Amino acid sequence: GKVEMVYEGDEVVSIRILEADGMVADYPIGVGQSLVVIDGEEVKAASRLTDGPANPHDIVDIFFAVYKEDPYILSLAQKKMAALQDFLTDRSEEEIDLALKCLINYEAARESFQRVQEFLVNEVQSVYQSQGVEISDKHIEVVVKQMTSKVRIEEGGDTTRLQGELVDINQIQQINEAMIITNRAPAEYTPVLMGITKASLNTDSFISAASFQETTRVLTEAAIEGKSDWLRGLKENVIIGRLIPAGTGFNAYENSNEEHQREPSVLLDDPTLDDLVGDDVVIDDKTARNYPLEYLQDEFVDDSSTFNEPEEDEYV
């Protein structure tokens, strides 16, 4: 048939096809579609009139118009609807209460973030358990925590962070707390799920990053930038042989160390220390290095003064 454009103002809203037998068919132009035919062009059946995404409503209408009499299609649709209804009705009361709450963006993102972490742990466990392997959740949780430890800055606010920068989530939370205390605008961020390789290389500890991949590049960049490693993670503490910051007793151990460090030590000018004999003095390395030698030099006897050099005739 022959193509005729239907205008509404200066915009083409539909294409009208005038067939040779007098039949007329209108084809509306959807959003985002562009014309591939011109006014007055002759087209054949099944010819393409527009280019671009199809209207999903039209697809649904065609689907039900064509297959509404097909019993297989109807039974399949009913099964899908029944499964969806069961999925919605089987939600726990906790999830329903959570959905009814009017959460702000931060709280909603935090809840979703925890659900993502739980989902990752459960999916990894399902793979291992299908092969009869039992692994404690804590081992997988360590990996998942590292994969979800970064956030992307969306709006820096009054902080020094730039948009698009990857920052540790604990660090940006501390920065935002400081911004709120000082009545300044905090940063807005989005949680990021990184792969294992990227998560291992994007860490504040260059010791941990160098132990995974690209050791030469990581160490070279750390040396050029003069980085400091604060040994806050697991891997860097394992590498240098320190106690790892993990476990229920770690905080108690740290507190006991702090209390021990606050205890007053023996002063170097303590008069009671001068009266001690050298064999009775028990001090640590740091105190020994700082202890004046004149306090102990009288306690030792210089045997070199009593050593008699042999006469020359004794060797003859």
Image (tube, grey):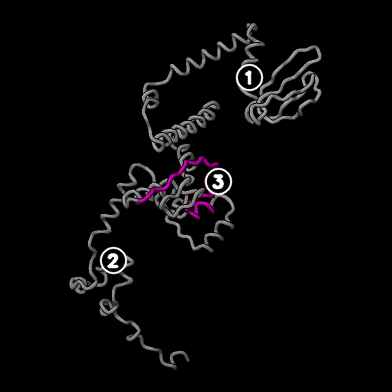
Classify mark 3: helix, strand or loop.
helix
Q: Label 1: which residue?
A: 58
Within 10 Å of disc 1 (Cα), the crowding (few <14, some 14-19, many 20+) is few
Is 54 drawn above or below residue 194 in the view shown? above
Q: Label 3: which residue?
A: 198
Residue 283 tag number: 2
Q: Nearer the viewer, mark 2 or mark 1?
A: 1
Three-letter residue code for mark 1: Asp
Q: Nearer the viewer, mark 1 or mark 3?
A: 1
Residue 197 in the image: state x and y as whole percent. Answer: 56, 45
Is 89 drawn above or below residue 231 in the view shown? above
The magenta span reads 184-210
Marks 2 and 3, how far apart in space?
A: 48 Å
The residue drawn where x is 30% and y is 68% is 287
Residue 298 in the image: state x and y as whole percent. Answer: 26, 80
Asked if residue 136 can be seen in this view, the reply is no
The residue drawn where x is 40% and y is 26% is 99
Say whether residue 195 is magenta.
yes
Residue 304 in the image: state x and y as whole percent. Answer: 35, 84
Q: Earlier in the sequence, mark 1 or mark 3?
A: 1
Three-letter residue code for mark 2: Ile
The residue drawn where x is 60% and y is 9% is 74
Classify mark 1: helix, strand or loop.
helix
Name the image quarter holding residue 305: bottom left
Residues tagged 1 and 3 counted as in contact (Cβ below 8 A): no
The residue drawn where x is 55% and y is 56% is 218
Residues tagged 2 and 1 counted as in contact (Cβ below 8 A): no
